[in-house]
Image (cartoon, rainbow, N blue to C red):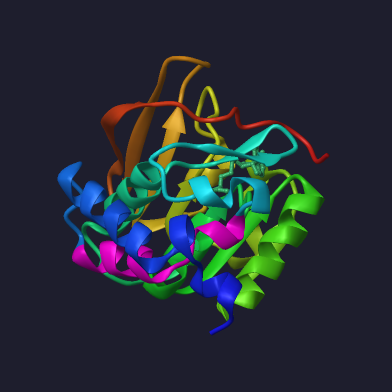
Amino acid sequence: MNMSIQGVGMTSQRTRGRMIKRLSDQGIKNQKVLEVMNDTPRHIFMDEALSSRAYEDTALPIGYNQTISQPYIVARMTELLLESNAHLEKVLEIGTGCGYQTAILSPFADRVYSVERILPLQRKARSHLVELKIKNISYLYNDGNEGWPEYAPYNGIIASAAPTEIPFQLIQQLALGGVMVIPVGHNGQQVLQRVTRKTSGYEVEEIEPVTFVPFLAGKE
Ligand code: SAH
């Protein structure tokens, strides 16, 4: 493993271990999620100037007015996605951003289909994931409002930007028994929701208040 992946000081395995301890204190229970986050260097996903802050429990800028989600949210959303199915065949991710959530999802899915509307972010994410030798990801540069119909239906869908209402096409691309974890609402009053597709329709659970960047339309 090269030094940049391994990290030193504030980017070391020890610092990451403290983040895992904190996540578990905050109520994250899925041990496999904690393990994967313990094994995944978060600092390589951000600019060098911010890498010493990578393991703080906070969202940090990744450029283009976007942020990497805070570790607690990444852990919580992954845990919610996996609660009834420990392994998913196909996962659709909207908002690749820097690729960190993608990396955490990767061992839990046969394949992750990740959509991003800002091309340079997608390119960077891809290079980080290649550096970590993560190979089961397909990338699409597009407006996530459309989902990714070609590979639908998905057993899991996760969005890391908040629409005011869940895009209809995303709901349509959820498999029977599939689960979507998505923040919904206007700036300042978003709620994390889990939508489960049942034979008779959809079950919606409101999980907790959250703060996400907005889910935008079109490509940049
Ligand atoms: N999980 C990412 C979160 C990045 S922030 C990370 O930890 O880095 C949210 C991301 O969603 C941004 O990259 C933003 O460009 C993207 N996004 C917002 N609206 C989108 C849309 N309609 N389609 C695709 N991506 C979108």
User: Vertical placement of 188 versus 147: above or below?
Assistant: above
Q: Which of 201 and 58 lies nearest the eye of the viewer?
A: 58
- Residue 153 position in % (x across, y down): 50, 61
* Residue at (56, 35) in percent of width and height: 167
Q: Which of 51 and 114 lies nearest the eye of the viewer?
A: 51
19 horizontally vs 60: left or right: left
User: Vertical placement of 148 versus 77: above or below?
Assistant: below
Q: Quadrant of residue 204?
A: top left
- Residue 50 position in % (x across, y down): 60, 45
135 horizontally vs 197: left or right: right
Indicate whether residue 205 is drawn in magenta.
no
| Quadrant occupied by the C terminus | top right
Task: Tell me where the magenta segment starts and ends, as one range.
Answer: 31-45
203 horizontally vs 124: left or right: left
- Residue 164 position in % (x across, y down): 53, 22
Farthest residue to the front: give it: 9
Q: Quadrant of residue 161?
A: top right
* Residue at (43, 41) in percent of width and height: 70
- Is residue 24 visible in the rendered image? The answer is yes
* Residue at (27, 45) in percent of width and height: 200
Indicate whether residue 42 is drawn in magenta.
yes
Q: Which of 138 and 16 lies nearest the eye of the viewer?
A: 16
- Is residue 172 visible in the rendered image? The answer is no
User: Vertical placement of 209 versus 128: above or below?
Assistant: above
Q: Which of 144 and 128 lies nearest the eye of the viewer?
A: 128
Give the main secondary structure, helix, strand or loop, of the magenta stretch.
helix
Ligand 1 appears in which quadrant? top right
